[in-house]
Amino acid sequence: MLRFNKNIAVSLGDPSGIGTEVFIKAISETDLKNSLDQITIFSDPIVIENMLERLSINIEINLLSKEQSNKQNCFNTVIAEKCDKYILGSPSSDNASYILSNLEAASKFANDNNANLVTGPINKSVISSVFSNFSGHTDFLKKQFLCEEVLMVLSNPKLRVGLVTTHIPHAKVHKSISVDKIVKKGILFANGLQQNFGISHPKICVLSLNPHSGEQGLIGDEEIEIISPAVDMLCNKNVNAFGPLPADTAFLRNEFDGFLSMYHDQGLPVVKTVDFHRTINSTLGLPFLRTSVDHGTAEDIADKLIANHQSMLEAIKVAGNVH
């Protein structure tokens, strides 16, 4: 019987998307049902009930209060805010407060109860249309818990990639990397690979920024001035780091446990190509581990019940610290 090493808090994301569907599928079609008492879901129960009915799945909902404890074989659910109205496939700003309330409550629960957090997909534009300072899960959680630095990691059972920079224009990448940033991200990556992915002595490849690692300065000096000193500093801090290595060949070498990528589209196309459906998004550097699906709300198929749940399944397993 599968049991988690860490309890999990879950926010299902936008009710008009596929978050609830893939979560229920991930639980019902695997032996994760045996660990339902270790999962606390933050959702209006009507959202779960409606999807259970659509999928013809029978799992009881246990509505939690302060006096109640989680039960086995139930969806143990906390209402952070009621969801007055939603339509599958039709995102609405009317649900922005509901989505954000669930995320805030679930993350607070994870922090207060030594649990990890799983988040379902959201439509950023839905929330930012009401809360203008919202730019996504990662930034929201970083600010909520006053974290100095966090690391976005995309992973699947075959490959793990950490990002030094995330959602910025390519033209700004070279000005956004620094020795200090690479060192901090590298340390978070090494610690996360040990604690969350069960790799006792992780070997990390630090990718170069320029083609052919800059050709010794002929096509960029970032490798000489920034990345190489950062790798040396990581090694001095007992991180098993190597590089900078050019990204066009680094992924062909099967000797590394993780790759630290300088920018979003350097590493992510590779990890998604290797195993798209089982790729997940993790945030390291929070007081807890946050994992999420690596896909969006998929409103175009939200009413068709055809969503693939493998990413959600992998996110739950990693959050539960099941190796």
Image (cartoon, rainbow, N blue to C red):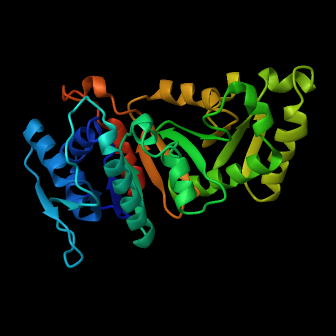
Q: Quadrant of residue 206?
A: top right
For residue 228, above or below residue 2: above
Q: Is residue 287 above or below residue 182?
A: below
Q: Position of residue 111 (x, y in %)?
A: 45, 67
- Taking 241 as reference, is 7 left or right? left
Image spot of residue 211 (x, y percent): 78, 21
Query: Is residue 322 shown to the viewer in this render?
Result: no
Observer-nearest of 235 and 140: 140
The one of 10 and 79 positioned closer to us in this rendering: 79
**Mark count:** 0
- In percent of width and height, residue 21 lies at 23, 39
Relative side of 272 to 224, left or right: left
Which corner quadrant of the image does residue 243 belong to?
top right
For the residue pair 88 and 208, the one nearer the viewer reads as 88
From the image, which quarter does the N terminus lie in?
A: bottom left
Q: Residue reaching furthest bottom?
A: 67
Depth order, front residue of 254/75 = 75
State which quadrant residue 310 falls in: top left
Q: State the image coordinates of residue 200 (x, y, percent, origin top left).
A: 58, 57
Residue at screen point 14% across, 50% down: 46
> What residue is at 27 percent from the left and 57 percent from the top?
81
Whether 323 is drawn above or below 256: the answer is: below
- Residue 103 visible somewhere in the drawing: yes
Residue drawn at the location 55% of the way across and 25% of the way down: 269
Residue at 49% over, 62% down: 288
Left or right of 113 in this view: 72: left
